[in-house]
Image (tube, rainbow, N blue to C red):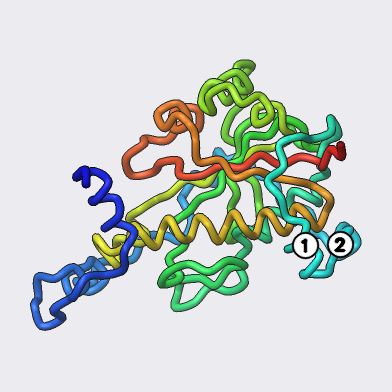
Amino acid sequence: MESKLRANRNFMKGYQVVDFSDPQNDFNSSDQQKGITHPPLQKEYDPHSAKTLLLPDFDETILKETNLNTLIKHRRSRRSYTPDPLTLEELSYLLWATQGVIRVYKEGIWSVRTVPSAGARHPFETYLVVHDIQNLEKGVYRYLPLTHELLFLFNRLTLQEEMCRATYNEKFIANSPVVFVWVCIPYRSEWRYKSGAHKSMLLDAGHICQNLYLAAEAIQCGTCAIAGYYQQGMDELLGIDGEDEFTVYLAPVGRIKHD
Protein backbone atom coordinates (compact mmCIF):
# COMPACT_ATOMS: atom_id res chain seq x y z
CA MET A 1 0.00 0.00 0.00
CA GLU A 2 1.22 3.50 -0.73
CA SER A 3 2.88 5.04 2.30
CA LYS A 4 0.63 8.12 2.25
CA LEU A 5 -2.53 6.00 2.29
CA ARG A 6 -1.16 3.87 5.13
CA ALA A 7 -0.22 6.96 7.14
CA ASN A 8 -3.69 8.41 6.70
CA ARG A 9 -5.32 5.13 7.74
CA ASN A 10 -3.17 4.98 10.86
CA PHE A 11 -4.18 8.55 11.68
CA MET A 12 -7.82 7.39 11.73
CA LYS A 13 -7.13 4.69 14.30
CA GLY A 14 -7.33 5.06 18.08
CA TYR A 15 -4.41 5.59 20.41
CA GLN A 16 -1.59 3.11 20.18
CA VAL A 17 -0.29 1.39 23.35
CA VAL A 18 0.81 4.09 25.79
CA ASP A 19 3.40 3.56 28.51
CA PHE A 20 2.15 5.83 31.28
CA SER A 21 5.26 5.10 33.36
CA ASP A 22 7.40 6.86 30.76
CA PRO A 23 7.62 10.56 31.69
CA GLN A 24 8.36 11.42 28.08
CA ASN A 25 5.14 10.05 26.59
CA ASP A 26 2.74 12.58 25.13
CA PHE A 27 0.17 12.23 27.89
CA ASN A 28 2.61 12.82 30.72
CA SER A 29 4.48 15.61 28.95
CA SER A 30 1.53 17.72 27.79
CA ASP A 31 1.46 21.39 28.71
CA GLN A 32 -1.43 20.66 31.06
CA GLN A 33 0.68 18.09 32.91
CA LYS A 34 3.54 20.60 33.06
CA GLY A 35 1.27 23.12 34.78
CA ILE A 36 1.29 25.60 31.90
CA THR A 37 -1.70 27.93 31.96
CA HIS A 38 -4.57 26.77 29.77
CA PRO A 39 -5.35 28.63 26.52
CA PRO A 40 -8.46 30.86 26.54
CA LEU A 41 -11.82 29.28 25.71
CA GLN A 42 -12.43 31.97 23.11
CA LYS A 43 -10.07 33.79 20.79
CA GLU A 44 -9.24 37.14 22.34
CA TYR A 45 -9.98 40.55 20.82
CA ASP A 46 -9.60 44.21 21.78
CA PRO A 47 -12.90 45.19 23.46
CA HIS A 48 -12.09 48.91 23.13
CA SER A 49 -11.88 48.93 19.34
CA ALA A 50 -14.19 46.00 18.60
CA LYS A 51 -17.54 46.36 16.89
CA THR A 52 -19.79 43.79 18.55
CA LEU A 53 -23.47 42.96 18.35
CA LEU A 54 -25.40 41.15 21.07
CA LEU A 55 -27.45 38.49 19.32
CA PRO A 56 -31.20 38.54 19.94
CA ASP A 57 -32.98 36.04 22.12
CA PHE A 58 -34.97 33.35 20.37
CA ASP A 59 -37.67 30.96 21.45
CA GLU A 60 -39.41 27.90 20.10
CA THR A 61 -41.75 29.99 17.95
CA ILE A 62 -39.05 30.16 15.28
CA LEU A 63 -39.00 26.36 15.02
CA LYS A 64 -41.16 24.96 12.24
CA GLU A 65 -40.47 21.35 13.25
CA THR A 66 -39.67 20.05 16.74
CA ASN A 67 -39.99 16.29 16.32
CA LEU A 68 -36.48 14.85 16.44
CA ASN A 69 -37.38 11.74 14.44
CA THR A 70 -38.77 13.91 11.65
CA LEU A 71 -35.68 16.11 11.61
CA ILE A 72 -33.35 13.13 11.38
CA LYS A 73 -35.46 11.54 8.64
CA HIS A 74 -35.61 14.71 6.52
CA ARG A 75 -32.00 15.81 7.01
CA ARG A 76 -30.29 16.27 3.66
CA SER A 77 -27.32 18.06 2.17
CA ARG A 78 -29.12 20.93 0.45
CA ARG A 79 -27.49 22.98 -2.29
CA SER A 80 -30.45 24.97 -3.62
CA TYR A 81 -31.78 27.93 -1.64
CA THR A 82 -34.46 30.52 -2.18
CA PRO A 83 -33.36 34.17 -2.55
CA ASP A 84 -34.93 35.02 0.83
CA PRO A 85 -32.70 36.19 3.70
CA LEU A 86 -32.48 34.63 7.14
CA THR A 87 -33.56 36.59 10.18
CA LEU A 88 -31.14 37.60 12.90
CA GLU A 89 -33.13 35.48 15.37
CA GLU A 90 -32.65 32.42 13.15
CA LEU A 91 -28.92 33.07 12.88
CA SER A 92 -28.77 33.47 16.66
CA TYR A 93 -30.43 30.07 17.07
CA LEU A 94 -28.09 28.33 14.62
CA LEU A 95 -25.03 29.75 16.36
CA TRP A 96 -26.30 28.69 19.77
CA ALA A 97 -27.14 25.20 18.46
CA THR A 98 -23.63 24.70 17.11
CA GLN A 99 -21.39 26.35 19.72
CA GLY A 100 -23.63 27.74 22.48
CA VAL A 101 -22.09 27.76 25.95
CA ILE A 102 -24.15 26.11 28.68
CA ARG A 103 -21.67 26.56 31.52
CA VAL A 104 -18.01 27.45 32.15
CA TYR A 105 -16.12 25.45 34.76
CA LYS A 106 -12.96 25.81 36.85
CA GLU A 107 -12.31 29.49 36.19
CA GLY A 108 -12.36 29.12 32.42
CA ILE A 109 -10.38 25.92 31.99
CA TRP A 110 -13.23 24.17 30.17
CA SER A 111 -16.84 24.66 29.12
CA VAL A 112 -19.94 22.62 28.40
CA ARG A 113 -21.61 23.54 25.13
CA THR A 114 -24.43 22.36 22.90
CA VAL A 115 -21.99 20.00 21.13
CA PRO A 116 -19.51 17.50 22.60
CA SER A 117 -15.76 17.99 22.43
CA ALA A 118 -12.89 15.78 23.58
CA GLY A 119 -11.87 16.91 27.04
CA ALA A 120 -14.29 19.82 26.71
CA ARG A 121 -11.53 21.69 24.89
CA HIS A 122 -13.72 23.06 22.04
CA PRO A 123 -10.88 24.01 19.67
CA PHE A 124 -13.11 25.61 17.02
CA GLU A 125 -14.00 29.22 16.36
CA THR A 126 -17.02 30.01 14.19
CA TYR A 127 -16.52 32.59 11.48
CA LEU A 128 -19.43 33.79 9.37
CA VAL A 129 -19.37 35.17 5.85
CA VAL A 130 -22.65 37.10 5.80
CA HIS A 131 -24.30 37.92 2.50
CA ASP A 132 -27.99 38.34 3.34
CA ILE A 133 -29.16 38.37 6.95
CA GLN A 134 -31.94 40.79 7.87
CA ASN A 135 -30.72 43.79 9.89
CA LEU A 136 -27.08 42.69 9.69
CA GLU A 137 -24.36 44.36 7.65
CA LYS A 138 -22.67 42.19 5.06
CA GLY A 139 -19.16 41.04 5.86
CA VAL A 140 -17.07 38.63 7.87
CA TYR A 141 -17.86 38.08 11.55
CA ARG A 142 -16.67 35.87 14.38
CA TYR A 143 -19.06 34.36 16.91
CA LEU A 144 -18.29 35.05 20.58
CA PRO A 145 -19.93 32.07 22.32
CA LEU A 146 -19.13 33.17 25.88
CA THR A 147 -21.35 36.24 25.50
CA HIS A 148 -23.49 35.18 22.50
CA GLU A 149 -22.31 38.12 20.42
CA LEU A 150 -21.03 38.73 16.92
CA LEU A 151 -17.71 40.45 16.37
CA PHE A 152 -17.61 42.36 13.07
CA LEU A 153 -14.25 41.90 11.37
CA PHE A 154 -14.43 43.46 7.91
CA ASN A 155 -16.24 43.70 4.61
CA ARG A 156 -15.01 44.17 1.06
CA LEU A 157 -16.65 44.23 -2.35
CA THR A 158 -14.78 41.14 -3.56
CA LEU A 159 -15.96 38.87 -0.73
CA GLN A 160 -18.36 36.74 -2.76
CA GLU A 161 -15.83 36.37 -5.57
CA GLU A 162 -13.18 35.28 -3.07
CA MET A 163 -15.54 32.75 -1.53
CA CYS A 164 -16.38 31.37 -4.94
CA ARG A 165 -12.70 30.95 -5.84
CA ALA A 166 -11.85 29.39 -2.47
CA THR A 167 -14.60 26.76 -2.90
CA TYR A 168 -13.67 25.85 -6.49
CA ASN A 169 -16.43 27.95 -8.09
CA GLU A 170 -19.32 26.39 -6.20
CA LYS A 171 -21.62 29.37 -6.70
CA PHE A 172 -24.35 28.07 -4.38
CA ILE A 173 -21.93 28.56 -1.49
CA ALA A 174 -20.94 32.11 -2.38
CA ASN A 175 -24.57 33.07 -3.08
CA SER A 176 -26.03 31.65 0.14
CA PRO A 177 -27.28 34.07 2.83
CA VAL A 178 -24.51 33.00 5.22
CA VAL A 179 -21.57 30.62 5.26
CA PHE A 180 -20.44 29.07 8.55
CA VAL A 181 -16.67 28.55 8.55
CA TRP A 182 -15.19 26.50 11.39
CA VAL A 183 -11.63 27.42 12.15
CA CYS A 184 -9.42 25.32 14.41
CA ILE A 185 -7.06 26.68 17.06
CA PRO A 186 -5.22 23.38 17.62
CA TYR A 187 -3.30 24.37 20.74
CA ARG A 188 -6.53 24.34 22.77
CA SER A 189 -6.57 20.56 22.45
CA GLU A 190 -2.81 20.04 22.12
CA TRP A 191 -2.42 21.71 25.53
CA ARG A 192 -4.11 18.66 27.03
CA TYR A 193 -3.57 15.81 24.56
CA LYS A 194 -0.46 16.86 22.62
CA SER A 195 -0.08 14.65 19.50
CA GLY A 196 -3.20 12.69 20.45
CA ALA A 197 -5.37 15.76 19.92
CA HIS A 198 -5.72 15.92 16.18
CA LYS A 199 -8.04 13.02 15.41
CA SER A 200 -10.46 14.13 18.12
CA MET A 201 -10.48 17.68 16.79
CA LEU A 202 -11.71 16.45 13.41
CA LEU A 203 -14.39 14.42 15.16
CA ASP A 204 -15.44 17.58 17.01
CA ALA A 205 -15.98 19.32 13.67
CA GLY A 206 -18.43 16.59 12.69
CA HIS A 207 -20.42 17.05 15.90
CA ILE A 208 -20.74 20.78 15.22
CA CYS A 209 -21.84 20.38 11.63
CA GLN A 210 -24.43 17.72 12.40
CA ASN A 211 -26.05 20.06 14.91
CA LEU A 212 -26.19 22.68 12.17
CA TYR A 213 -27.94 20.23 9.86
CA LEU A 214 -30.64 19.43 12.41
CA ALA A 215 -31.08 23.00 13.64
CA ALA A 216 -31.34 24.29 10.07
CA GLU A 217 -34.00 21.70 9.22
CA ALA A 218 -35.95 22.79 12.30
CA ILE A 219 -36.33 26.31 10.84
CA GLN A 220 -36.96 25.09 7.27
CA CYS A 221 -33.46 25.95 6.14
CA GLY A 222 -30.83 23.74 4.64
CA THR A 223 -27.08 23.34 4.69
CA CYS A 224 -24.36 21.34 2.99
CA ALA A 225 -21.11 20.32 4.67
CA ILE A 226 -18.10 21.41 2.63
CA ALA A 227 -14.67 19.85 3.03
CA GLY A 228 -13.51 20.64 -0.52
CA TYR A 229 -11.98 24.10 -0.43
CA TYR A 230 -8.71 25.84 -1.25
CA GLN A 231 -6.92 25.98 2.11
CA GLN A 232 -4.77 29.04 1.56
CA GLY A 233 -7.62 30.90 -0.12
CA MET A 234 -10.04 30.32 2.76
CA ASP A 235 -7.48 31.22 5.40
CA GLU A 236 -6.54 34.41 3.57
CA LEU A 237 -10.20 35.34 3.08
CA LEU A 238 -10.72 35.19 6.86
CA GLY A 239 -7.43 36.89 7.67
CA ILE A 240 -5.99 34.02 9.73
CA ASP A 241 -2.41 32.73 9.70
CA GLY A 242 -3.03 29.18 8.43
CA GLU A 243 -0.68 27.68 11.04
CA ASP A 244 -1.91 28.29 14.59
CA GLU A 245 -5.42 28.93 13.26
CA PHE A 246 -6.77 27.42 10.06
CA THR A 247 -10.00 26.50 8.27
CA VAL A 248 -11.21 22.91 8.67
CA TYR A 249 -14.87 22.83 7.58
CA LEU A 250 -17.57 25.10 6.21
CA ALA A 251 -21.27 25.04 5.46
CA PRO A 252 -23.57 27.49 3.66
CA VAL A 253 -27.10 27.98 5.00
CA GLY A 254 -30.21 29.14 3.17
CA ARG A 255 -33.95 28.63 3.00
CA ILE A 256 -34.96 25.34 1.43
CA LYS A 257 -35.85 25.57 -2.22
CA HIS A 258 -38.41 22.88 -2.99
CA ASP A 259 -38.28 21.32 -6.44
Which quadrant, please, contains the C terminus?
Answer: top right
Element assignment for label 1: helix
Residue 149 screen position, x and y as percent: 66, 51
Residue 123 sits in which quadrant? bottom left
User: Front-most of 82 and 89?
Assistant: 82
Where is residue 207? Give x, y as percent. 55, 61
- Amino acid type of the residue that numbered disc 2 sits on in the rendered structure: Glu
The residue located at (29%, 50%) in the rendering is 8
Task: List x then y, in percent, for residue 5.
Answer: 27, 46
Residue at the extreme bottom of the image, as rendered: 21
**Disc 2 vs disc 1: Cβ atoms closer than 8 Å?**
yes
- How packed mark 1 is, by other alpha carbons closer than 10 Å (few <14, some 14-19, many 20 or more), is some
* Amino acid identity at mark 1: Leu
Q: Is residue 230 above or below residue 146?
A: above
For disc 2, the marked residue is 65
- Residue 146, image quadrant: bottom right
Q: Among all residues in the image, which is located at the extreme front?
A: 1
- For the question of whether residue 51 can be seen, the reply is no
Instruction: Give the numbered dot on residue 209.
Output: none
Quadrant of the rendered image containing residue 58: bottom right
- Residue 98 appears in view: yes
Point out residue 160 in the picture as x, y percentages from the top left corner: 63, 22
**Residue occupying image coordinates x 40% and y 28%:** 232
| Apparent side of residue 14 relative to residue 230 in the rendered image (left or right) | left
How far is disc 2 from disc 1 in space, using C-alphas?
Answer: 7 Å
**For residue 71, which numbered disc appears in the image?**
1
